[in-house]
Image (cartoon, helix red, strand yellow):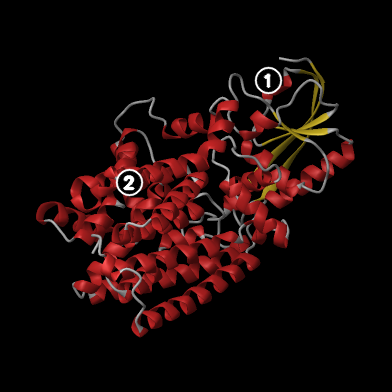
Amino acid sequence: MLKADPGQANHPSSAAEDRWFIQLIVFLAVITLLRFVALSLSKTDLFFDEAQYWSWAQDLSFGYFSKPPLIAWVIWATTSVCGDGEACVRASVPLFHAGSAIFLFLAGRDLFDARVGFWSAVIFATLPGISFSANIVSTDVPLLFFWSAALYFAVKLQAERSWRWAILLGVAIGLGALAKYAMLYFYLCAAVWFVVSPAGRWLLRDWKGLALLALPLALLTPNLIWNVNNGLVTFAHTADNAKLGGPLVHPGNMLEFLIAQLGVFGPFVFPMLLVIAIRTLRRGGTEEDRYLLAFSVPVLVLVTVIAFLSRAHANWAATTYPAATILVTATMLRLKRDTIFSATVGINIVVLLLLAVAPAIADRLTLPAGGDPFARTMGWRETAHAVREAVEDGQYSAILTDDRAMTAELLYYLRDSGIPIRAWPSDGPPRDHYELTRPFTGGTKEPVLLVTLREPRNRITRHFSTAEPIGVEKIDAGPKTTRTVILTSMSGFKGD
């Protein structure tokens, strides 16, 4: 139970619990090794967000334009160990996912029993959304790790009311927020828990509750200072991402978001989560059920509302699923829903294997409808090679870009060239990290090579005395997809 029970604190693990834990470690070791092999065999280039995070890691800071700094620190750590190859940039991902599963085992064991903990960890580690993200280094991966840790620490804090668990919980929230500000949804979930269950309200009258606010704030303070010194750009970008300034009714976007959750959480477990939530609201539930619903459903509801008012990406509700996985798993085992349970595990394993193999054949894989599923992560190495040849032929002093994706990809794939890469600044405030940190200025030595994915026309060329087209490169980005790259020689910058 989630109520304090000091007499049962620190009880030794039983032999059965140890067996479940050993089986989990073996399972996680196997799929983690599989994911490392998949990363090493992947034919995909870095997605431009990944390339951007790599470029951040070359200039460690307490903040960046669109995200807090932890993702850059993690990439710096992995690439310092094994180099700057794509697999090393992504190397932390399988480890974080395995860590998240271990924390969910611990939380499920303490809330229910070791069997629930084991299957919760297995199902979470193989969720379709987790298997998809295992191929990509993103801010959601460490976010889910620290959210899963926080769930467990909160359970232990409630059971023992000790400072150790309060400190660990505060640190987990703070580090999670340094990965992605969505970690702060944990406070929303805690507020809901206090409303639906009196068991946790003692924190509101205890110094440990204050510590749970102070510790994360202390960890976030350097990032807050960075934001203040840089015009609060990360907060402005985060608010702008929701795009709440337009018409405030988008039922189609909401439906699309909810359908996407079937792919993220699974075609059986997502509907089960909704059914469990509705039944608990109508009939009540156990203390454990209310805790897990409080730390899952509020995030899903909030992001669904955002999708209705504007739009929401499928991953914005990612923090719903650690607690939801334990809840749905425990319910399936308790009610003996063996068919649904077996189908869930089976589908997850099949999807895991497909998504582990697919990147290795990304250069020849097409969808039944004819599209290239990896088009956005293919052809960037070849794009950089074409740009490198143009730079060498024309002896350009710098590369000028007008697109965040192109800037990030060239920074990564031309990392050993030594040629400066500058971003064309927008009218008004900077729109991305590169416009903020490496804008093109009049002091740049000429000529420069403009590299763009769209016709520059008068938008940029009017600022130069000479703008000479020198080529249009057609780059394969999959078996059926071509990326058009336009190269223009620019000189005689006239200023704004």
The answer to which of 289 and 217 lies nearer the viewer is: 217
* Precedes in sequence: disc 2 or disc 1: 2
Q: Which numbered tag is attached to residue 299? A: 2
- Mark 2 lies on a secondary structure that is helix
Residue at image x 78%, y 46%?
386
User: Disc 1 designates what residue?
Assistant: 458
Q: Nearer the viewer, residue 294 or 10?
A: 10
Residue 76 in picture, x, y percent from top left: 67, 52
Three-letter amino acid code at the position of disc 2:
Val
Q: CA distance from mark 2 to mark 1?
A: 45 Å
411 left or right of 365?
A: right
User: Total label count?
Assistant: 2
- The location of residue 268, given as percent across then percent down, is 28, 64
Asked if residue 318 lies left or right of residue 140, the reply is left
**Quadrant location of the C terminus?**
top right
Amino acid on which the number 1 mark rests in the picture: Asn
Which image quarter: residue 430?
top right
Q: Is residue 347 above or below residue 276?
A: below
The quarter holding residue 110 reads bottom left
Q: Residue at x 59, y 37 (%)?
A: 64
Give x and y (percent) for residue 289: 22, 60
- Name the residue: 47% across, 49% down: 176
- Residue 126 in sight here: no
Quarter of the picture holding the N terminus = bottom left
The local crowd at label 1, few if under 14, some if 14 to 19, many if 20 or more residues have their Cα within 10 Å, is: few
Is residue 370 placed above or below 331 in the rendered structure? above
